[in-house]
Image (spheres, grey):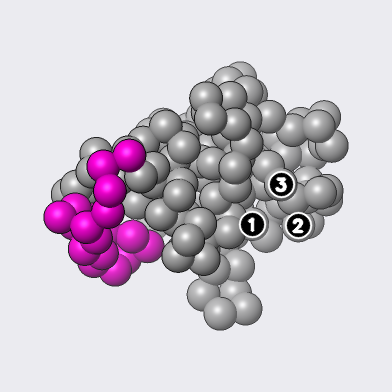
Amino acid sequence: MTTFQLNGKTVIVDLRPGTTLLDYLRQEGFFSVKYGSDKGETGADSVLVDGKIMNASLMLIHTVNGKTIETVESFATGRDVHPLQDAFIEEGAIQCGYCTPGMILAIESLAREIETPSEDNVKDVLAGVYCRCTGYVKPIKAAIKYLAAKNTKGHEGK
């Protein structure tokens, strides 16, 4: 048996040992986590594991026992999107959308790790998510916009 938190809910599964986290998430309807390759080369299969960006296709389900998993599905509440998703929309950073969930999770992971990430930090974290459409310019602008707003809000009243 494997027990973990998935988007704020406790999950208990008993799956065959070779099942990947990607396989499980897709069969459960988490379509923001996409197949890109069996080697984790594209970042399309990105999830947050205990707040860190990871490739779901490279993780066997039993390795997430006791961990917290987040997908992009946890970022929106009804029709209200997460401020990072909003920044992507405002900057026109979404094109085909295949890589967008991975980019959003990568940027959020960075925001949780470093209080004031630089543009170079953003570029580094986005390098793990392969994108053919955007050329990364607009996603980087969206990330900088989100991080600046988050940093400003985080210092209000201090």
State the image quarter where residue 53 is shown: top left
Whether label 2 touches label 1, CB < 8 Å: yes
Q: CA distance from mark 1 to mark 3?
A: 14 Å
Residue 151 seen in the current view: no
Judging by the rendered image, the residue that carries numbered circle 2 is 89
* Helix, strand or loop for disc 1: helix
Residue at image location 58% in from the left, 55% down from the top: 32
Left-right relation of 1 to 30: left
Q: Amino acid at mark 3?
A: Tyr
Which is more toward the observer, 10 or 106? Answer: 10
Judge the density around disc 1: few (<14), some (14-19), many (≥20) Cα neighbours within 10 Å: many
Judging by the rendered image, the residue that carries numbered circle 1 is 85
Please state the extent of the stretch shown in magenta in the rendering: 1-18
Residue 12 in magenta? yes
Which is more toward the observer, 14 or 63? Answer: 14
Residue at image location 29% in from the left, 68% down from the top: 9
Residue at image location 62% in from the left, 36% down from the top: 36
State the image quarter where residue 133 is shown: top right
Q: Of circles 2 and 3, which is in front? A: 3
The spot of residue 12 in percent (x, y) is 21, 63
